[in-house]
Image (cartoon, rainbow, N blue to C red):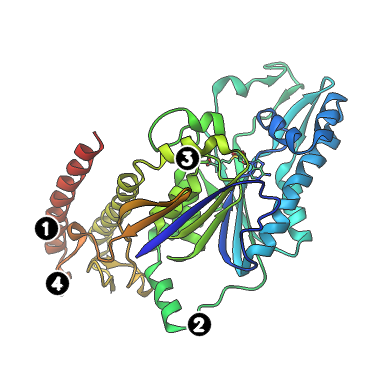
């Protein structure tokens, strides 16, 4: 399997390079209106915003900033295929203007515009951010009634264009089955509250780029991509930042188009990609390992499973997971100025393969097999760590 990943440095209010109805999923996080770190980028796009902020007209500034985002959402509607999903990560803002502290509810403003555009709203996700302790004391501290509640969550708004996506041909159905996630992942991922995301630092090569660029966590993008698209789909991020959604698409085997207005991000985006192959493989191995841990626990508690996954031969909870396969990315190649190609293995990772026609009905036998496989995986983990250094 191969995927391509292309970046455009331009204003996403006009996505001329992208054809109508050619995108299967959008995952993005725009600059947050009324959060000060984004004032400059918004005022550069519309000088009236500078005037509004200067004259302390917060409501006007908020509206003008959203009008820039609205033009991007217009384009998103044009380029998404019918049935495609759009995920928008957004946080609300709090700001004191003219000594008046107030909330600017970005998520409601975006939600109502997307509905105006004809999208259907699906249940959204709240994810909990890690916050800095000093922010907790906003307002009058310990003296009532003038202290303010701290914003410790962000929203992932989820929309669909038109009706549910259909998978008609045998080939489409097969790709969909191969793109399944595990039953236990489904139970966790499809909760409307995510508490487990590391929100403060980009997990790929550790500098503080996330703090400067407000990147979202890799897991957020990767999870949404696995939840709402299938392998080989085309994913779009019109506010690419340092490229987290592209990393998610690379790890998940999806094609990708990313847009950002700031060409200065190019070197950071490129350097972040340097260890994406190893990083993605670690993520995939973690998912498989977590599944086997789940299998081990469940066999101990409840006995054998009814279903078997074909590529790996390990037990799974449902028949929908029968063809699930996590393709390991093997290489990343630059094939144009801002275009990359990832090549993947099409077979199951050796150390996770159970003996194909091994009928694991006995608990003790199942445990022995798990232990053997665990040893093989430990060795593989060690090899990957050595490679990292
Ligand atoms: C919140 S950041 C995105 C962070 C990204 N999710 C990540 O993980 O790195 C928003 C990005 O939108 C970009 N941006 C702002 N206005 C834009 C526009 N009109 N078109 C395209 N990109 C824009 C900014 O340069 C910034 O990189």
Point out the quarter of the image occupied by ligand 1: top right
Residue at 57% from the left image edge and 38% from the top image edge? 263
Q: Is residue 286 left or right of residue 187?
A: left
Mark 3 or 2, closer to the camera: 3
Q: Are marks 3 and 4 in contact (CB under 8 Å)?
A: no
Q: Which mark is residue 368?
A: 1
Residue 359 position (above or below residue 373): below
In the rendered image, which quarter contains the N terminus?
A: bottom left
Q: Which mark is residue 61?
A: none
Q: Are marks 2 and 1 in contact (CB under 8 Å)?
A: no
Is residue 208 at least partly visible in the picture?
yes
Q: CA distance from mark 3 to mark 4?
A: 45 Å
Q: Are marks 4 and 1 in contact (CB under 8 Å)?
A: no
Task: Say which element carries label 1.
Answer: helix
Q: Which mark is residue 358?
A: 4
Mark 2 residue CB less than 8 A from any atom of ligand 1: no
Residue 162 position (above or below residue 372): below
Q: Quadrant of residue 300?
A: bottom left
Mark 3 or 1, closer to the camera: 3
Mark sitting earlier along the chain (3/2): 2
Task: Say which element carries label 2.
Answer: loop
Task: Say which element carries label 4.
Answer: loop
x then y, percent, for residue 49 = 81, 34
Q: CA distance from mark 3 to mark 1?
A: 44 Å
Mark 3 or 4, closer to the camera: 3
Q: Residues within 10 Å of mark 1 (few under 14, many from 20)?
A: few
* Tag 2 residue: 168
Mark sitting earlier along the chain (4/2): 2
Q: Are marks 4 and 2 in contact (CB under 8 Å)?
A: no
Q: Which mark is residue 269?
A: 3
Mark 1 residue CB less than 8 A from any atom of ligand 1: no
């Amino acid at each position: 399997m191969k995927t391509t990943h292309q970046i455009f440095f331009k204003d996403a209010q006009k996505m001329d390079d992208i054809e109508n109805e050619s995108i299967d999923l959008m995952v993005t996080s725009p600059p947050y209106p009324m959060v000060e770190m984004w004032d400059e980028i918004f005022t550069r796009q519309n000088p009236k915003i500078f005037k509004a902020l200067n004259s302390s007209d917060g409501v006007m500034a908020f509206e003008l900033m959203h009008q820039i985002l609205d033009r991007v959402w217009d384009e998103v509607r044009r380029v998404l295929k019918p049935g495609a999903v759009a995920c928008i990560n957004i946080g609300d803002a709090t700001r004191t203007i003219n000594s008046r502290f107030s909330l600017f509810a970005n998520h409601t403003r975006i939600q109502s515009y997307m509905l105006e555009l004809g999208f259907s709203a699906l249940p959204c996700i709240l994810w909990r951010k890690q916050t800095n302790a000093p922010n907790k004391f906003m307002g009058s501290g310990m003296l009532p009634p003038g202290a303010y509640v701290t914003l410790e969550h962000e929203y992932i708004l989820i929309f669909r264009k038109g009706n549910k996506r259909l998978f008609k041909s045998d080939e489409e159905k097969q790709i969909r089955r191969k793109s399944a996630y595990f039953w236990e992942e489904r139970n966790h991922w499809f909760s409307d509250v995510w508490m487990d995301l590391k929100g403060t630092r980009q997990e790929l090569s550790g500098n503080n780029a996330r703090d400067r660029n407000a990147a979202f966590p890799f897991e957020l993008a990767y999870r949404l991509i696995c939840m709402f698209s299938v392998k080989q789909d085309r994913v779009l991020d019109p506010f690419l930042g340092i490229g987290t959604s592209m990393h998610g698409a690379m790890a998940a085997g999806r094609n990708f188009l990313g847009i950002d207005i700031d060409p200065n991000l190019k070197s950071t985006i490129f350097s972040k990609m340097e260890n994406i192959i190893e990083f993605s493989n670690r993520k995939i191995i973690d998912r498989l390992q977590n599944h086997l841990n789940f299998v081990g626990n469940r066999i101990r508690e409840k006995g054998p499973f009814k279903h078997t996954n074909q590529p790996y031969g390990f037990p799974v909870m449902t028949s929908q997971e029968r063809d699930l396969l996590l393709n390991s990315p093997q290489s990343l190649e630059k094939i144009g100025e801002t275009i990359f190609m990832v090549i993947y293995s099409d077979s199951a990772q050796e150390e996770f393969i159970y003996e194909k026609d091994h009928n694991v009905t006995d608990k003790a036998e199942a445990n022995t097999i798990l232990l053997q496989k665990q040893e093989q995986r430990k060795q593989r983990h060690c090899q990957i760590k050595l490679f990292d250094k």
